[in-house]
Amino acid sequence: MARVISVCLPMWPIDRRQRQADSTPSAEAPLILVGRVGNRRVVTAACAAAMGLGLRVGMPVSQAQALVPDLRVEPADPRADLEALERLGLWLLQRIAPIVAVDPPDGVVIDVTGADHLHGGEEALLEMLLGRLTLSGITARLAIADTWGAAHALARHHRESAACIALPGATAAVLAPLPLVALRLPPATVAGLRDLGFATIGDLMDTPRAPLTLRFGAELCRRLDQALGEVAEPIDPLRPASLVEVRRSFAEPIAAAETIARYIGKLVVDLCAALEARGEGARRLDLLCWRVDNRIETVRVGLAVAQRDPKRLTRLLCDKIPGIDPGFGIEIMTLTATLVEPLVPRQASSLLEQAPPDISDLVDMLANRVGHRSVYRLSPVASDVPERSVARIAALSPDQGLGWPGHWPRPSRLLPRPEPIDTLALLPDHPPNWISWRGIRHRVRRADGPERIFGEWWKRDAEARAVRDYFRIEDEAGQRFWIFRAGDGEDAATGSHRWFIHGVFG
């Protein structure tokens, strides 16, 4: 079943201007954008501060200036807004999914069918998207549903939260209470339906189609069927001219896996030739297979380092063929390098020099099978707090030259977060006599410590006096654990004085 994300940017022209504005006092004044409707100058967009003062889109500029004397007025630039929206769409294309399209004037649509698991699920994907847009100064509302029409309607008319998820198969139920304008109908059609007593999309669902079509034309029922998924609404993927893309069309649709593999090889050869002419290598490839029923099957392949080796790229793409459903046949195949980097030829090592091992092929194979988030390496971080002293980085990231301090031993297995334990110990400096962790009691035979670690006061006020006293302990069976007491054992302001286990020594 298809899953589509609609990204609504209700303040897009204003957000774009405010990101470009400098930090002068005038930049903080309420902002409106002005355009022409016929011979009239009207407000086409207004910031939140201006709308809070009573200004509205469509209001004459003279009236707006009379209401707010210190108003900042700038001309609207729809062309620049659309170009910026396309750049945002390209950014989403390179990071989220192979099928992204601009939904002007205030949105982007993303087909994430089969791609949400790469980002930790639909909820995590929406949270990540919303967070990144918000940090970039962009006001956004997001929704995911089975169809473009349903996601578009929920993103713009669902008011309970900034991110909405319609469960698969629940399209009709979530659309029913929404207003008629959510169907992307012309204003005249919406006004006519209201005159007849229709208020919500649910009112239209049980109404016979013939009278509606006779009165309002085919557009009304087409939009309703598209939202409900009864009529296909294909998404035309965004493909800027800067992207390297090759294409194959077939006089007769193809469906056999061997045929698909053969043409993937031909597309890869053509793509690598185009990349070589530009001195670039691919970091991400998107294969789109256009079926005869207007559905698009997608394959995305990522690479740890830039490549244009036809054999390697062909093998990675062909490994994904079992996931392609050709249906009644594929009539068009396109291969796009959506993310590229400069790649210049390097001189081969001499016979006397030993070339460093190249594990990028292994990393690419594993990452495309289990997901790029599952293939990584650990890098030290300058922090005394154990859970902050390590970070995940890309598997082939260059060595930063950092290392962990070696004056105190550290466990081979650090728990994702400290887990509470039951214990008994004399305060303030004595190790515990026993611990109980996950229902198992361990009597302590040997112990070493304490190692005192202070909170990082510059990060938050709560850590200004925080203290942890760490102990290395060994039980009667020879198992060794890394435990700590929150607090110095005397002052309650330094911690709760509860005990936790933080790691296990190998």
Image: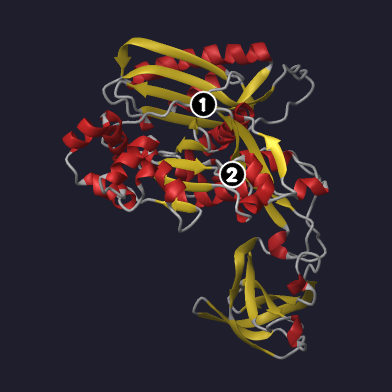
SS for dot 2: loop
Q: Residues within 10 Å of mark 1 (few under 14, many from 20)?
A: some
> Between 193 and 105, which is closer to the camera in this rendering?
193
Query: In the figure, 463 relative to 160: above or below?
Result: below
Question: Left or right: 235 with respect to 134?
Answer: left
Q: Which mark is residue 11?
A: 2
Mark 1 or mark 2: which is in front?
2
Residue 225 rendering spot, x and y as whole percentages: 27, 36
Residue 93 rendering spot, x and y as whole percentages: 54, 33
Closer to the chain start, of discs 1 and 2, is 2
SS for dot 1: loop
Question: Left or right: 83 with respect to 188?
Answer: right
Task: Please report the residue visible at 65 percent of the width from the left and 50 percent of the height from the top.
Answer: 50
Residue 41 rendering spot, x and y as whole percentages: 61, 34
Question: Left or right: 80 with respect to 293?
Answer: right
Task: Tell me the amino acid under the disc marked 2.
Answer: Met
- Quadrant assignment for the C terminus: bottom right
Residue 175 rendering spot, x and y as whole percentages: 33, 49
Task: Please report the residue visible at 58 percent of the width from the left and 28 percent of the height from the top.
Answer: 39
In this orientation, does residue 150 appear? no
Task: Please report the residue visible at 66 percent of the width from the left and 51 percent of the height from the top.
Answer: 67
Q: CA distance from mark 1 to mark 2?
A: 22 Å
Question: Which residue is denoted by mark 1 in the rendering?
Answer: 238
Q: Residues within 10 Å of mark 2 (few under 14, many from 20)?
A: some
Q: Which colouring convention does the figure follow?
A: secondary structure
> Between 273 and 433, which is closer to the camera in this rendering?
273
Query: In the figure, 188 relative to 294: above or below?
Result: below
Q: Quadrant of residue 293?
A: top left
Task: Tell me the amino acid under the disc marked 1.
Answer: Leu
